[in-house]
Image (cartoon, coloured by chain):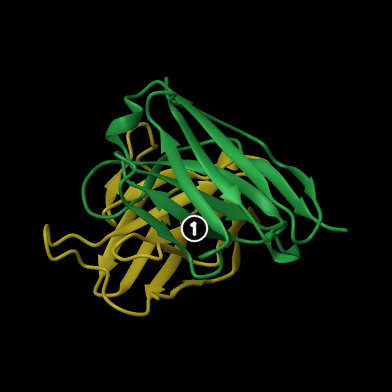
Chain colours: A green, B yellow
Amino acid sequence: EVQLLESGGGLVQPGGSLRLSCAPSGFTFSNYAMSWVRQAPGKGLEWVSAISGSGGNTYYADSVKGRFAISRDNSKNTLYLQMNSLRAEDTAVYYCAKDAGRGGGSCFDYWGQGTLVTVSS
Amino acid sequence: DIVMTQSPDSLAVSLGERATINCKSSQSVLSNSNKKNCLGWYQQKPGQPPKLLIYWASARESGVPDRFSGSESGTDFTLTISSLQAEDVAIYYCQQYLSIPWTFGQGTRVEIK
């Protein structure tokens, strides 16, 4: 059974940093691209960042480019999102999502339960 | 960026009746490599993560009831629930995955009338 378990969320002041982690299980992690998708309270879904299976290619939404960094450690089966210079508008539930791996771009066949990041003074 | 626009924002349907949700992309999401539309549909229930229902615009994900179907016409896409069940109350999102940034529609809330 595929599972994705996020951790690392919490309350942080504007300008602060936070690192999210995602621990997948039930599939060969290194074979799949992974993404972070966020959802502000009461709002819709926003793709944030993606990384290829090898980790050699990374992609970002303009809203986080230069502030967030996605990475993965395939030997530890873990996905990360380093978030710096956090702003109030980054407040959201952050989901780890697995690429369905059917070719082309990413639709997401498995999602974690999410971790809440709150940016507030 | 490709903008995805859903309509309506919300709809109320009687149990057993048909629910239809529309999604329009601001430009083609047709893949040159396999000639399929890179369009997915997700269902999100309160307090839960999204669940993939449909990919390639009309392919049903494994385990998804066959009352859910997707159709396509150019840049217009439709998710149909043929006979609404109580457990289908949720917000539904479309997503294009042709080009980065992957983008979602704003969501359509489905309720019971």
SS for dot 1:
strand
Q: Nearer the viewer, residue A41 or A49?
A: A49
Few, some or many residues within 10 Å of mark 1 (<14, 14–19, 20+)? many
- Residue drawn at x 44%, y 23% as measured from the top left: A76
Where is residue A75 drawn, in percent x and y? 38, 24
For mark 1, name the chain: A
Residue at mark 1: A47
Q: Quadrant of the N terminus of chain B?
A: bottom left
Q: Nearer the viewer, residue A68 or B106?
A: A68
Where is residue A82 drawn, in percent x and y? 58, 47
- Residue drawn at x 33%, y 40% as measured from the top left: B61
- Residue type of the residue flagged with mark 1: Trp
- Looking at the rendering, which quadrant does residue A33 occupy? top left
For the question of whether residue A31 can be seen, the reply is yes
Image check: B4 left or right of A18?
A: left
For the image, the number of numbered tags is 1
Q: Residue furthest right?
A: A121
Image check: B41 left or right of A91?
A: left
- Looking at the rendering, which quadrant does residue A109 occupy? top left
- Residue drawn at x 37%, y 29% as measured from the top left: A74
Image check: B106 left or right of A8?
A: left
- Residue drawn at x 60%, y 61% as measured from the top left: A44
Q: Quadrant of the C terminus of chain B?
A: bottom right
Where is residue B81 drawn, in percent x and y? 44, 51
- Looking at the rendering, which quadrant does residue A59 occupy? bottom left
Q: Nearer the viewer, residue B108 or A106?
A: A106
Image check: A42 left or right of B20?
A: right
Q: Is residue A84 above or below residue A24?
A: below
Q: Is residue B49 above or below residue B28?
A: above
